[in-house]
Image (spheres, rainbow, N blue to C red):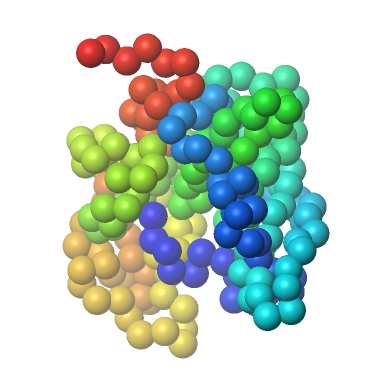
Amino acid sequence: MSKIWTYSLALVLTVTAISSASAETVEADKSCFDVALIATSPRYRWQPVESKPDEIIIRSPVSIRFAVKQVIAGSIKSSDIDVRTSLHTRFNSAIKQFLLFLKMERDGKYSLQESNYQLVYDRKGKLVWPIASPLDKSYTEDGFTPSNYETLMRPIHYRAKDAWWLVTPPDVDRPSADEYSWGQLDNDGIIMASRGISAVDLVAAAGGKQCGAKVAR
């Protein structure tokens, strides 16, 4: 996933953060997930942070309520779900769908283990992740995207402008060729990926990391 333009440049909230000790609590163990689902319409409830006068606040704990559109793995009982994580501001309003990997904690609430917000609907109505160039190794080393993700990639067809993170803003230089080595750049500076991974296939590939999953040895 591209890390460019992840959050809206116009900050809706004052930038806040969380101390390193609290961050370790919020960023839970990412060894497994209980539920993977597609969600929309995030609503934020920020938690207070105690800090010393000379501390710089970067992230703050937040509970986010999402509307659940599709449960891909696991099960939940409601059409809404509250997710705990830490952020420095709201997500970019251009994000329409979130693929969330969630873990149920001892108090019955969910913590965010990983998310993919670079999803668009293809022309068949399926959610896909357009991938225009090789992924940074951090995505396959630290998360639920497998190192052999290329084997999951298939030809995809979608509206180029829907992939907002692949659209070059007017005041930004056109991307270099290595940013779309698996796609093409049109005259408007929009990168079009020729292949990608469906959200369902991405979750299936991570099935071995679902909490309680039996992995063959």
Q: In which quadrant is the C terminus drawn?
A: top left
Q: Residue at x 60, y 54 (%)?
A: 21
Rendered position, 125 above or below 168: above
Q: In which quadrant is the N terminus drawn?
A: bottom left
Return the residue nearer the eye: 60 or 12: 60
Return the residue nearer the eye: 31 or 172: 31
- Does residue 136 appear left or right of residue 83 in this picture? left
Rendered position, 181 above or below 149: below
Counting labels gives 0
Q: Residue at x 66, y 75 (%)?
A: 55
Q: Residue at x 37, y 29 (%)?
A: 206
Q: Residue at x 43, y 33 (%)?
A: 31
Return the residue nearer the eye: 142 or 99: 142
Q: In this orientation, does residue 98 appear?
A: no
Q: In this orientation, does residue 138 appear?
A: yes
- Does residue 182 appear left or right of residue 114 in this picture? left
Residue 141 percent location from the top left of the image: 30, 45
Residue 12 percent location from the top left of the image: 73, 71
- Does residue 69 appear left or right of residue 107 in this picture? left
Return the residue nearer the eye: 68 or 123: 68
- Does residue 22 appear left or right of residue 202 in this picture? right
Residue 30 percent location from the top left of the image: 47, 38
Residue 37 percent location from the top left of the image: 56, 32
